[in-house]
Image (cartoon, grey):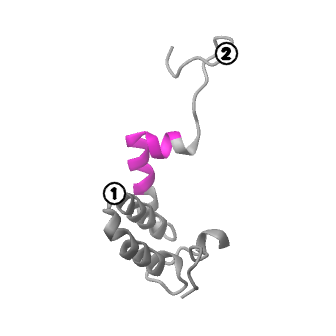
Amino acid sequence: QNGGSHGGGHLVEDTSFRWQCVEQPIGKLLFQRFLEGTPGLAAAGALWAELEAYERCEDAERGGAAAALRGRFFTPGGAEHCGFLSAAAMAPPTGEAPP
């Protein structure tokens, strides 16, 4: 039974974004290439790549990496400002003043 069985013996395919574009390597690669090649979405692809790099960096490097991310993607006028992000995503972390 490909895809697994969920109750009653019916096959259920996971069609969520997370499964198709994050957890599946080929889906992730194809979606990232789509972002990179689509005007207006290239910054989203770059943000995704930088967030993954941030998750892999050492704890001592995270403060500087986070500041660089905020300046590049989250600050209006930044090199690759992602204006499509919600106000909550753009808000400075708790305890920090806006730039």
Q: Nearer the viewer, residue 74 or 27?
A: 74
Provide the residue span drawn in magenta.
Answer: 19-33
Residue name at image x 51 percent, y 78 percent: 81
Dominant secondary-structure state across the stretch colored magenta: helix
Q: Nearer the viewer, mark 1 or mark 2?
A: 1
Q: Nearer the viewer, residue 17 or 30?
A: 17
Residue name at image x 60 percent, y 18 percent: 11
Q: Please give the label number shown on residue 56.
A: 1
Q: Nearer the viewer, residue 10 or 96?
A: 96
Q: Quadrant of residue 6?
A: top right
Please, is residue 41 above or below residue 72 in the view?
above
- Tell me the amino acid under the disc marked 1: Arg
Q: Is residue 71 left or right of residue 65?
A: right
Residue furthest top as drawn? 9
Residue name at image x 45 percent, y 56 percent: 34
Q: Secondary structure at mark 1?
A: helix
- Tell me the amino acid under the disc marked 2: Gly
Residue 25 magenta-drawn?
A: yes
Q: Is residue 32 visible?
A: yes
Please, is residue 49 above or below residue 23 in the view?
below
Q: Is residue 86 visible?
A: no
Residue name at image x 46 percent, y 46 percent: 22
Classify the position of the C terminus by image quarter.
bottom right
Q: Nearer the viewer, residue 77 or 91?
A: 91
Percent position of residue 37, x then y: 42, 63
Q: Quadrant of residue 4?
A: top right
Task: Please rate how many residues cluster around mark 2, counting C-alpha atoms within 10 Å: few if below 14, some from 14 to 19, many from 20.
Answer: few
Q: Secondary structure at mark 2?
A: loop
Q: Earlier in the sequence, mark 1 or mark 2?
A: 2
Q: Please give the label number shown on residue 7.
A: 2
Residue 63 magenta-drawn?
A: no
Please, is residue 76 above or below residue 47 in the view?
below
